[in-house]
Amino acid sequence: MRGGPFDTQAFTKYDGVRMKKRTIGLLAVGLLTAIVVSVVLHLMQAGKSPVSGFVAADQRSLFPSLRQDRQEIRLIRIEGPGGPVSIERGRKGWKLLERDGYPIRDGAVQELLDGLGALRATYVSAEKDPPYESYGLADPKRDAGASPRVTVISAQGTSLASAAIGHTFSAPGGTRLSKVFVRRNGEARVWLADGKVRVEGSPLEWLPQSIVDVPRRQVSEMTTTGANGERITIRREADAAFELADGAPDQHDRAAVDAMASALEGLRFQEVRAAGKVEAVGKPSGRASITTDDGLIYRVRLVEESEDVWAIFSADVRQPPAGRAGERARSFNARHAQWAYKLQGYVVDYLRTGPDDLGR
């Protein structure tokens, strides 16, 4: 029946018109984007700034000292939201002073220095006191800490580069046109520079937060001892399920037993401090040992300080060691044994599981 409430032909015609309008709309958006990119490219090629209030600059490096010998660099300071961050070159590499000298993650410093060293002055603000906030920068006369400021210092104490880093400017659809707003220390003008710079303002973002990854299927035995001395051991053979070997109630929660064995799976820390400082003021709050199929034993001492619980790790091997277990233990200790880590709450619970936690 034509014209009725379920007129298929009418619905199909309406749907077709709607699809055509949608297609035309998408084409219009694409055309507009292409026009914007074309205009921006034309302005840049003509030496005109794509940002109002900026004029062409001479393309020189903003920080030529960073394009030379970087072995002279001793310290990098970052001030601003989330900071401060102080990264110092040590005998074994870069370390974070705000976390007792914990090693910086691989490649992080190189990435920052490469980004700063590659910045080239494309445009500069025509005004001496431009609207800083519009470019993601703090007004140096009022609130210098509102945007991240990076300072690179040599072994002689000389400043090799110092600047506040603002917003990134990108033309729509043109990733190769990426630029960043920069204000060098001691200058009022803002530069729109070619390049990308990522400045991590939080100290923890500079650290490799992974501790260890031991999937439950690789665990052969685990023992936990609470602060009250109560002890539990779980054990399994080959691919069998975990069985309670010591200290647990006859009736127990199977899921809770399996959860214990996953304590070191994808383990990451939330905070870190030197182990000696934590032990000097804290008190013991339990311990655990986790043995893997190849005989590597991870030992964890829990230390309670105020309302926080910190975990101090070490590793050794069951004799005789299998495969490369001994080498892995030495490598683990070299990296982690001198540090205390704050872990997620559920991990701490696994590491000090007691009989009451397993009872049904």
Image: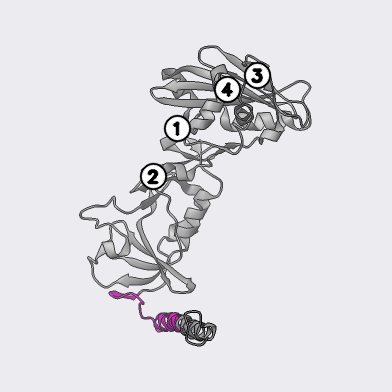
On the picture, is 41 further left or further right than 124? Answer: right
The answer to which image quadrant residue 128 occupies is bottom left
Left or right of 325 in this view: 5 = left
Mark in the foreground, 3 or 4? 4
Disc 1: CA contacts within 10 A as few (<14), some (14-19) or many (>=20): some
Name the residue carrying label 3: 233
Where is residue 55? Give x, y as percent. Answer: 32, 76
Per the image, the residue denoted by label 2 is: 157
Name the kind of residue labelled 1 in the image.
Asp
Quadrant placement of the C terminus: top right
Which of the two marks, 4 or 1, is nearer to us in this view?
4
Q: Upstream in the sequence, badge 3 or badge 4?
A: 3
Q: Is residue 51 magenta?
A: yes
Neighbourhood count class around disc 3 (C-alpha, 10 Å): few under 14, some 14–19, many 20 upward: many
In the picture of the structure, the residue carrying the numbered disc 1 is: 100
Q: CA distance from mark 3 to mark 4?
A: 17 Å
* Image coords of residue 240 (percent x, y): 76, 29
Q: Is 258 located above or below residue 201 in the figure?
A: above
Q: Which residue is mark 4?
A: 360
10 versus 97 height, above or below: below
Of the numbered discs 3 and 2, the one sitting upstream in the chain is: 2
Q: CA distance from mark 4 to mark 1?
A: 43 Å
Q: Amino acid at mark 4?
A: Arg
Whole-Å distance between the Cαs marked 3 and 2? Answer: 56 Å
